Image: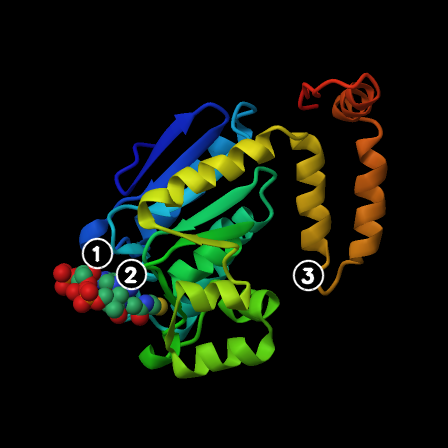
Amino acid sequence: MDFENIYIEEENNFATITINRPSKLNALNKRTIEELQVAIAELDEDANIKVIILTGSGEKAFVAGADISEFAHFSVKEGRQLAALGQKNLFNAIENLSTPVIAAINGFALGGGLELAMACHFRVASSNARMGLPEVSLGVIPGYGGTQRLPQLIGKGRAMEMIMTAGMIDADKAFAYGLVNHVTSLEELVPLCVKIAGRISNNSSVAIKHAIKAVNAGFKYDVDGYAVEVDAFGHCFGTDDFKEGTTAFLEKRKADFPGS
Ligand code: COA
């Protein structure tokens, strides 16, 4: 697939995906969502890529939401399908990806944009970032997992207030809420994510894959997260990475994980 609305840069063991529709503040239209799906699946398949960083182009927006012009005329059935397919194909796919995905929030992250950032494994923001779920101001609700992930990340009361007021919070408040892990200058945003990516990529990607699965299991109502952890823990003992990690520790050297 030729990408029109995103571009990918690869360096060492990580890849940066940049959503590139700055004239529309990187709003997620259908094409952009499809391109993100394909890009993320391809990068996840690439054994050399240990971390994915997701950001927006320009200095103003990460993503200013789903593209309102595309769904303004939708029927009940189409609205339902928009949310269901988006959740399944992109937002849940990112959350459950084996490769860690860091959102680098470089400006407005609104509606579907904040939902996209929340689907990532964690978030870093620049100090100019503004975050919110403004959907009720449009007569709709968050449909890409926002009503579920925002309370998981910041607590129910704060999420209710953000959703009901449709207001925006700044980067410092997002940090205080635990919605973002770090706040930095716009210039330092991607470099900081790269630094974190470097620390992640020193570790066993197989173990990280299992850790993501176990952590996510705790947020699924029909799954016993502790049981998933036990299985994933046991599975690690059969991997080459476990042999290498424990051997390297005992031999007092840095592990060189084979990734299997
Ligand atoms: N969907 C479609 N287009 C969008 C968009 C969205 N979610 N967000 C921004 N755009 C477009 C604007 O329509 C405008 O396009 P135009 O130049 O062709 O008119 C362009 O991006 C720039 O946005 P603009 O509103 O002029 O910038 P601003 O600095 O005045 O305001 C925002 C910035 C983010 C406050 C404002 O764009 C906004 O409120 N966007 C919608 C946010 C939203 O409700 N998202 C949730 C959707 S479910």
Count of picture labels: 3
Q: Few, some or many C-alpha atoms within 10 Å of disc 1 (few <14, some 14-19, many ≥20)?
A: some
How far apart in space, not on screen, are marks 2 and 1 (Cα)? 8 Å
Q: Is residue 72 left or right of residue 37?
A: left
Q: Is residue 4 left or right of residue 166?
A: left
Q: Is mark 2 within 8 Å of ligand 1?
A: yes
Circle number at residue 236: none
Q: Earlier in the sequence, mark 3 or mark 1?
A: 1
Are the residues flagged by discs 3 and 2 in contact, CB closer than 8 Å? Answer: no
Are the residues flagged by discs 2 and 1 in contact, CB closer than 8 Å? Answer: yes
Q: Position of residue 24 (x, y in %)?
A: 21, 56
- Dot 2 falls on a residue whose secondary structure is loop
Circle number at residue 67: 2
Instruction: Name the residue carrying label 1.
Output: 24
Instruction: Name the residue carrying label 3.
Output: 219
Q: Is mark 1 within 8 Å of ligand 1?
A: yes
